[in-house]
Amino acid sequence: MIRPLLTSLLLLIFGILNCEPVNAKTSFRDNAPIVVLVGNPASTLRDNLMPLNFFYKNSLSETIYFAAELSMPAREIIAISYKNNFSQSLPGKAVKIYMANTTASSLSGGWLPGAGFSLVFDGVLNFPLGINEIYIQLQTPFQYNGTNLAVRAYRQMENQTYSISNDFYQTATTSYPNRTRYAASDMTTYNPLAPQATGILSNRVPNTRIWFRNEPSPVNGIAIVRNQESVNLSWEALSGASSYSIYASGDPLTGAWSLAGETVNTSYQITVGMSSRRFFRVVAILQ
């Protein structure tokens, strides 16, 4: 299992109309989140069964993330993201995410008690065509206590089904058997806190990034250069970083961050167009 711990720096960039140079209005690392990746980023294993199943009208899944994987003391979780590969663009899908601290190490005995879960996200998400990082900013941050973490993902019932090829990337973890349970139905509207279905067990974990709140930590050496329709971002190397992930957003207040690229270098060029306003977040992956 690859368990890189990530540290991020937040970089806000505004594209100026009429092809003027890009100006760095704000450049800081303020409460930059610590991001933990669970799952092997090189894994090509994927299917449509978890964490959300769009081949059926209604789905539910539950996964245990182990303390040994998270390597994190008690800290607030502010976001979670999943890597997908969809054959369709599915905008505006109603999703609920629940979280619970747990000492359970297996779901072989059934779903965990619903009373222990907190609803941390209840809204709509966009699932673009192709490979994407589906970033979910929690509406209610979750207080993780340093034990195992259970995440329950619920796709609310709708009247339509979609392609069987709307997949999420996963990693098989034979050292953690029965860590995931999932169910899907066209007929039954599941109660996410008291599932009516037994579900199916799996040793797979969705390739997941969990975003923890961090203390403020200043960063230096950020540079921003615009060249025609592109922006070149550069930053100082972070000791221990194996690579960097760059996220982009048109409006960070909506939480709609998408993965723009990855690099092992300390610079990255992104095409932004002649008239645009973009926000960028650079995340250093420590492995």
Image (spheres, helix red, strand yellow):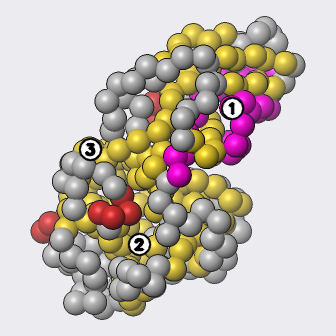
**Residue on which disc 1 sits:** 266
Q: Which mark is residue 76?
A: 3
In this view, the residue farthest toward the right is 228
| Dominant SS in magenta | strand
Q: What's the residue type where badge 1 is placed?
A: Thr
56, above or below 268, in the image: below
274, above or below 164, in the image: above
At label 2, counting other C-alpha atoms closer than 10 Å, the crowd grade (few under 14, some 14-19, many 20 or more) is many
> In screen coordinates, is 207 left or right of 123?
right
Q: Earlier in the sequence, mark 1 or mark 3?
A: 3
- What residue do we see at 14% from left, 66% from top? 116
> In screen coordinates, is 88 left or right of 283?
right
User: Which quadrant of the structure image shows residue 279?
Assistant: top right
| Callout 1 secondary element | loop
Q: What stretch of residues is rendered in magenta? A: 260-287
Q: What's the residue type where badge 3 is placed?
A: Glu
